[in-house]
Amino acid sequence: MDKNIVVAIDGYSSCGKSTLAKALAKKLHFIYIDSGAMYRAVTLYFLRNNIDLTNHDQIAQALKNIHLNFHSRDYQTHILLNDEEVSDEIRLMPVTENVSSIAALHEVRVEMVKQQQRMGRSKNIIMDGRDIGTVVFPNAQVKLFMTADPKIRAERRYKEVVIKEPHISLEEVFESLAHRDYQDTTRAESPLTRAEDAIILDNTDLTPDEQLAFAISKVEPFLK
Ligand code: CDP
């Protein structure tokens, strides 16, 4: 019987939130929900359909036409946009470059937060994103706020990106992360910020196993 434990992981772009969230979910048998994948899938739909970001009717109609579903295999995120598997396409640069503008829209946030809260009802979940501990689940039992040196973050992301988009340089990845962090922390609605009761986890010098052990020690008291 699930106790409805919520672990909220927020933080900057590419600081290892999803690596930690997946490992933690696997270890504890919790459900992992990647809220960023939802904003990315919405962005893909908006780009494909040339939605005008200043036109509220178009945005509202687009949101009505978007149906998102997760299916979980090996704790990897598989997201379906209107029944199409888009997990790989949402990680490519065109979506990455536009996602923070689209995630800043009021209508988009209201709809995503509603869906995220529904997914967390009466289950043990780990959700990562930017506003999980502040807005989506302000009563989460465990809140982590992750950070890491920006250069290290860019190097980590570059290694992932270059496999599929070899023309991209480390400098471009660094700039793109810095720009997204700026947009995410300065937007009017639900900006990325540490919840007062969130524990800071700086993983610049931590291995994945070390950060997992740290997180488990924070969740364990709630499992008893
Ligand atoms: O994996 P990465 O750190 O690159 O980002 P992500 O978690 O996939 O999120 C992509 C973008 O979605 C972020 O830069 C935010 O603009 C937006 N996002 C958000 O606004 N709120 C969330 N809860 C999650 C993501």
Image (tube, rainbow, N blue to C red):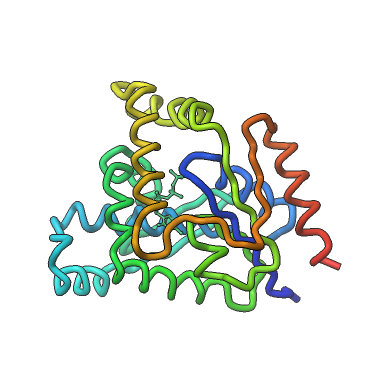
Classify the position of the C terminus by image quarter: bottom right
- Residue 137: percent from left, percent from top: 57, 70
Q: Quarter-wise, where is residue 204 in the image?
A: top right
Task: Work out whether residue 195 or residue 40 is closer to the camera in this orientation and state it.
Answer: 195
- Residue 16: percent from left, percent from top: 56, 41
- Residue 110: percent from left, percent from top: 37, 73
Classify the position of the N terminus by image quarter: bottom right
Tell me if I can see residue 127 in this picture: yes
Residue depicted at x 51% and y 29%: 156
In the displayed structure, 163 sits above or below 89; it is above
Residue depicted at x 70% and y 68%: 141
Task: Work out whether residue 181 or residue 109 is closer to the camera in this orientation and state it.
Answer: 181
Task: Work out whether residue 182 or residue 154 is closer to the camera in this orientation and state it.
Answer: 182
Q: Quarter-wise, where is residue 182 in the image?
A: top left
- Residue 46: percent from left, percent from top: 21, 57
Residue depicted at x 71% and y 41%: 211
In the displayed structure, 117 sits above or below 190; it is below
Residue depicted at x 57% and y 42%: 147
**Side of 15 where 79 appears, left or right:** left
**Side of 66 where 112 appears, left or right:** right
Q: Quarter-wise, where is residue 138 in the image?
A: bottom right
Q: Residue lying furthest right in this view?
A: 224
How many numbered discs sit on the rendered protein?
0
Tell me if I can see residue 31 in this picture: no
